[in-house]
Image: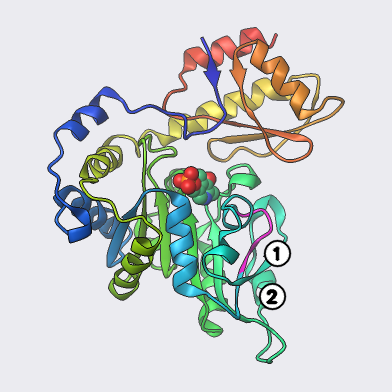
Amino acid sequence: MIIDLRSDTVTKPTKGMLEAMWAAEVGDDVLGEDPSVQALETRLAAMFGMEAGMFCPSGTMSNQIAIKLHAGQHKEVVCHKDSHIYLYEGGGIMANAMASVRLLDGKYGKLSAGTVEEAIQPEDVHAPMTTLVSLENTMNKGGGSVYTLGEVKAIQQVCQAHQLKLHLDGARIFNGLAATGEKAEDWGNVFDTISVCLSKGLGCPVGSVLLGDKAMIHHARRIRKSMGGGMRQVGFMAAAGIYALEHHVGRLEEDHRRAKTVAEILSAQAHTAEVFPVPTNIVIVRLAGISPKEMLAKLDEKGIRAVQFGKDMIRFVTHLDVTDDHLEAMQKRLK
Ligand SMILES: *Cc1c(COP(=O)(O)O)cnc(C)c1O
């Protein structure tokens, strides 16, 4: 039995999800005729109290479209130095939006209102124009760390005072909401755009939805088309998303509970120097006396899979396909 903790993207669709996909009513979504896609977009927008949504093939595309909406040449995006939009989207801030980027520091990948305010460029021809602040929740490189509503509201106030747009990379927003018990609608109130991934903790094979107001999403459809992201009978994928919203949101706390167990198992290991706090489904371990490569090879021999995460760290992620049996086996194999 392989215990695959590399990412929450490795899940395969459940039987129920596959049945929902088979049964989907579909149409040509580029012509605006796919009822399943429209149902998903409307439903997710309503959950977050936002006006409109747009299905995208990946979270990367949702984020990149948002950045293109809010920034461009001579403009600057403010984000954490470890954010996904900067580190893991192929240099897209430059390649797609041709925007400058200002990278900030902050514990466990989080920004504060104060550091955001300090980073805003002066009104001066020498400087790029700050137009966008992008946050990530939960924060992957911060060990699945979670912002509270109060923290993001403080950042929103800075953005409003300086007429900046505020985007949320909400690839794992439902994990964040499960951890704090806050309401999606309250979060929708804070941001101009939010990208939500269906292919992470929610267990869909594909997909992300970008949320915003009607005018933004209307323009976003042009950008998506130019990126080659307009898809035809994609309602089969949207149906998986609807199924996930109904069946896989309420169970995320199980992933969080299991991640804490993974952290306990790893804390007891010889080469563990530090385990990041585990508020959600991500466990980051800093190693000592062994390289990530060596450690991953050792784990692989025992049928346990994780990934390297920076120079001296490895990452484990719990998800829909990880059970208590897997964790019992992991515990035994690492004794
Ligand atoms: C996975 C992820 C994305 C989007 O990834 P895709 O693989 O393109 O869907 C965006 N942000 C974060 C924080 C992620 O973990």
User: How far from the left and from the top, in percent, is residue 298?
Assistant: 72, 15
Crowd band around label 1 with a 10 angstrom C-alpha radius: few (<14), some (14–19), many (20+):
some
Residue 97: image location, x then y, percent: 53, 69
**Picture coordinates of residue 169, whole percent (x, y):** 49, 56
Front residue of 243 and 18: 18
Q: Is residue 141 magenta?
A: no
Q: Amino acid at mark 2?
A: Ala
The residues tagged by marks 1 and 2 sit, at their Cα atoms, a distance apart of 8 Å
For label 2, the SS is: helix
Q: Of 36 and 185, which appears nearest the observer?
A: 36
Left or right: where 105 falls relative to 176: right
Q: Are marks 1 and 2 in contact (CB under 8 Å)?
A: yes
What residue is drawn where x is 42% and y is 48%? 58
Q: Which structural element holds mark 1?
A: strand
Question: Does residue 176 appear in this view?
Answer: no
- The magenta span reads 78-83
Residue at 48% x, 74% y: name it.
Answer: 70
Occupied quadrant, residue 331: top right
Q: Which mark is residue 119?
A: 2
Q: Quadrant of residue 334?
A: top right
Q: Mark on residue 45?
A: none
Mark 2 lies within 8 Å of ligand 1 (Cβ measured): no
Q: What residue did someone put label 1 on?
A: 104
In front here: 16 or 296?
296
